[in-house]
Image: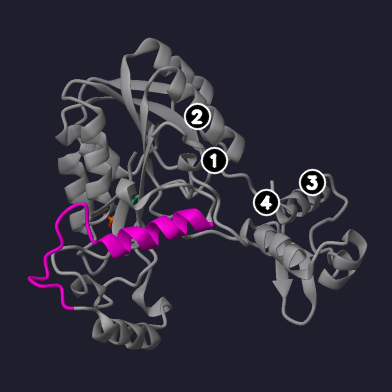
Amino acid sequence: MTRYEQLAQQLREQIRTGVWQEGDKLPSLRDTVRRSGLSLMTVLSAYQLLESQGWIRSRPQSGYFVAPARVTPRYSSSPPPLLPSETVDINAFIFSVLQAGNDPGCVALGSAFPDASLFPQHQLSRSLIKVARQMPSQGSGVTLPPGCADLRRSIAQRYAARGMEVSPDEIVITSGALEALNLGLQSLTRPGDWVVVESPAFYGALQAIERHQLKAVAVATDPQQGMDLDALAQALRQYPIKACWLMSHAQNPLGGSMPAASKQRLLALLAEHGVGLVEDDVYGELYAGLAPPLPVKAWDREGRVLHCGSFSKTWPPASGLAGWRRGSRPGSFSACS
Ligand SMILES: Cc1ncc(COP(=O)(O)O)c(C=O)c1O
């Protein structure tokens, strides 16, 4: 746990036990820096983390205050720990829901794409034009798999900056994360195999399972703790599981992330049963705090995790990026060993 996470945890505990109550003003950033010996950046990150989690609120010029009592969200009906299914038949339902999004009277609250108006469009366009002018001619303009070597090297450097050793040769550029996720699932399974998915899961995972004619065991997933690992262990004992598909960070649709210790236990469980992981990390670049949390891939030493990321959720939609590399949507990638 980083220092700012430790400080946030301390403050959270103090709020939980009533040391600080609703409406109380928390010690100022400066006081906390003086008292704790931590840097201003660390203290600020801790406060911002608590604010993003709804524990405190900032008031301009006044400081940070304890937010009104949190209501812990509860499912009206908790999913069962394990839900096996020999067939997955979800496509028709998903298309009817997606179609409803075209209805002008319907607000697509489930959309996973950021609103284009939130981005500095003008600056982005200027940068893109500048880069496009500097780009060497690409001959026919078609980049064949595994994708542009420079881009794979840049992605490897982004992994390296997070302490992860992934060589450019292990990276494949795909046309969106969904393609990477599907390729990952296909490489680990054959029709009729059993796979583990989260409950609730991103609908794309269920569609992929249907398309590849797989059987699914849905394992209960909690917004704060992630997948129920005891239930996963049971599934691994009971079924000949070949692959597991999950999101360890900013899970869609729950929004929560697994604690680092759970990510390590998950990997150990999968290793014990020789099961591969398709890790959907499309929101890996979205986080509160100073550094993004590490994906399960960070602890993988044997090429068990097929890590699939994407720029499609952090670049503005329809920004003109779609045209920058003919034949592919803005960059998604999977790092496969
Ligand atoms: C959780 C999740 N995974 C994967 C995808 C697919 O990503 P891409 O648009 O890069 O194919 C999405 C898209 O909405 C998503 O929400």
- Picture quadrant where residue 72 is located: top right
Label 3 is placed on what type of residue?
A: Glu
Residue 311: where, in percent of width, then height? Answer: 35, 62
Contact flag, marks 1 and 3 (Cβ < 8 Å): no
Residue at the image position 46 percent from the left and 54 percent from the top: 159
Magenta range: 137-161
Is 165 situated above or below 38?
A: above
Residue that carries the numbered disc 4 in the rendered image: 70
The crowding category of the residue bearing disc 2, from other C-alpha atoms within 10 Å (few below 14, some 14 to 19, many at least 20), is: many
Residue at the image position 18 percent from the left and 49 percent from the top: 96
Q: Mark 4 falls on what kind of element?
A: loop
**Extreme residue in the right direction:** 35
Which one is in front, 216 or 39? Answer: 39
CA gap, disc 2 to disc 3?
Answer: 27 Å
Residue 39 shown left or right of residue 31 in the figure: left
- Picture quadrant where residue 151 is located: bottom left
Residue that carries the numbered disc 2 in the rendered image: 266
CA gap, disc 3 to disc 4?
Answer: 13 Å
CA gap, disc 1 to disc 4?
Answer: 20 Å
Label 4 is placed on what type of residue?
A: Arg
Residue that carries the numbered disc 1 in the rendered image: 258
Query: Of marks 1 and 3, which one's residue comes earlier in the chain?
Result: 3
Residue 40: where, in percent of width, then height? Answer: 78, 69
Coloring scheme of the render?
one colour
Q: Mark 2 falls on what kind of element?
A: helix
